[in-house]
Structure formats: structure tokens, C-alpha cells
Amino acid sequence: MATVVITAGTITVFGEAIVDPVLIVQKIENSVVNLIAAIVFIVATLAINIVANLVSPAYDLANAAPKHINFKKGTIITAILSVLVMPWKIYVSPVAVNYFLGGLGAFLGPIFGVMVIDYYLVKQQKVDVHSLYKEGATSPYWYKNGFNLQALAAFIIGSIFAAIVALVPMFSYFAPFSWFIGAMISAVAYRGLMQRNQQIVVEKTQSISVIE
């Protein structure tokens, strides 16, 4: 709401719609206002990136190898990797930005598709929170050696199709929808794989009962 009001105000004050807050501040001929705005932008940038782009991957790395990586080490690794990928190189090129965002969406969409189907259709909106933190075959979320192979297969299937749509120039018209395409394909694939797996389990159980 504030963005809409401020942007609408720039039309009245400056005669044009300005959506970039930095450009709005540049047009204000007051050094004190410019200094305060610069401080606000710096704090906002740091706060947003720390919460959105640092904390989550740091915890992911710590959870991936808890014996070797704690939150502090995960934060340091994330910070180093964020510099090595040179995001400023991507930002200055519109083509690179589109490919990066399209490729990223192609891999995030399938994850979303699997999660939604798993929660609403497979688990029927019932989650055993205690078992989520339980390791070993006694946990219902342990699957096969700690990996849900059906989920991984569905993710790979959706990612392949979504990545082709996002990165191959022939499908550039559909590239903006790569996230949705990946999500839908993975969702359908995961649902089918889980139904097949459940059917196999039932058949094995019935065959064991007959033998006994």
C-alpha cells in the first residue's frame, strides 16, 4: 500500500511515476534527507538479506552435516559462496537475470509441488511433529535409509521439464511459467509414484499373510 501511495505521489511531485525509492531520494535536494535515506537503505538491505538469504542456507548446511557444520560455520560458508557466485555480474545483465531466475524457479517449483501433494493428499494434512525429529527406521518419515525416493524421482522429473522450458530458447514463450510447470509435473508424478508404492506395499503385505 505504501509503495502504491508513494509511486502515485511521484507523478504529482515529479511529473512521472518512479518506482525505485533510490531514484526518488536522488531527486530530493536535501543533504540531510539523502543521508538519512542512505542509512535506511543500508540497514534495510542488510536486514532483508540476513533474514531471507543467510539464515536459511546456514541452517540447511548445518542440518546437512551436523557433526561437522554448526550454524556459525554454515553462515561463514554461505557468505563465502554468496561472493564466489558474483551476483553483481548477474544483476547487470537482463539476459543473465532472466536465465538465473528462470533456472531457479525451475528447481523450486518441483519442490513446492511435492510438498503440497505430500501434505494434502498423501499425509491427509496429518503430521507427527515429534517424528519429524526422530532418526531411524521407527520414524514414519525415514522412508528408505532416510530418503523418500519417490519424492526425489518426482523432483527430478519436474526439474528436467521445467529447466528445459526455462533455459531452452525454443520455449522462451513459456519460460515465465517454468515454476508452475515444474510444480504441476512434480505434483502429478509424486502422486502417481506414491500411489504405486503404496499398492506394492499392500500387495507384499497380502502375499506375506497368505504364506503365513
Image (cartoon, helix red, strand yellow):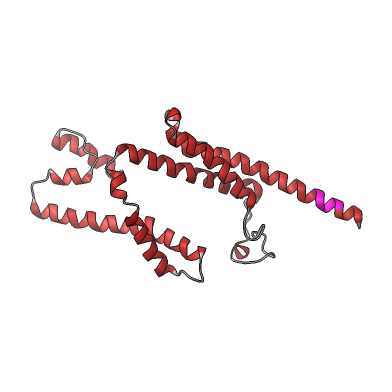
Tell me if residue 2 comes above or below residue 37 in the rendering.
above
Q: Is residue 186 left or right of residue 25?
A: right
Where does residue 87 sit, x and y in percent of width and height? 32, 49
Residue situated in front as seen by the camera: 66 or 113 = 66
The residue lying at 15 percent from left, 33 percent from top is: 15
Residue situated in front as seen by the camera: 108 or 8 = 108
Query: From this viewpoint, is residue 103 visible?
Result: yes
Tell me if residue 88 comes above or below residue 95 in the rendering.
below
**What span is in magenta?**
203-207
Q: Is residue 12 left or right of residue 113?
A: left
Residue situated in front as seen by the camera: 88 or 32 = 88
The residue lying at 51 percent from left, 71 percent from top is: 67
Q: Quadrant of the N terminus?
A: top left
Where does residue 154 sit, x and y in percent of width and height? 60, 44
Q: How many marks?
A: 0
- 206 inside magenta stretch: yes
Query: From this viewpoint, is residue 51 visible?
Result: no
Q: Seen from this angle, which residue lies furthest bottom?
A: 67
- 28 inside magenta stretch: no
Where does residue 134 sit, x and y in percent of width and height? 62, 67
Q: Is residue 31 left or right of residue 125?
A: left
Quadrant of res 186: top right
Q: Quadrant of the C terminus?
A: bottom right
Quadrant of res 147: bottom right
The residue lying at 29 percent from left, 46 percent from top is: 89
The residue lying at 38 percent from left, 60 percent from top is: 78
Main secondary-structure element of the magenta-colored stretch = helix
Where does residue 21 sit, x and y in percent of width and height? 22, 45
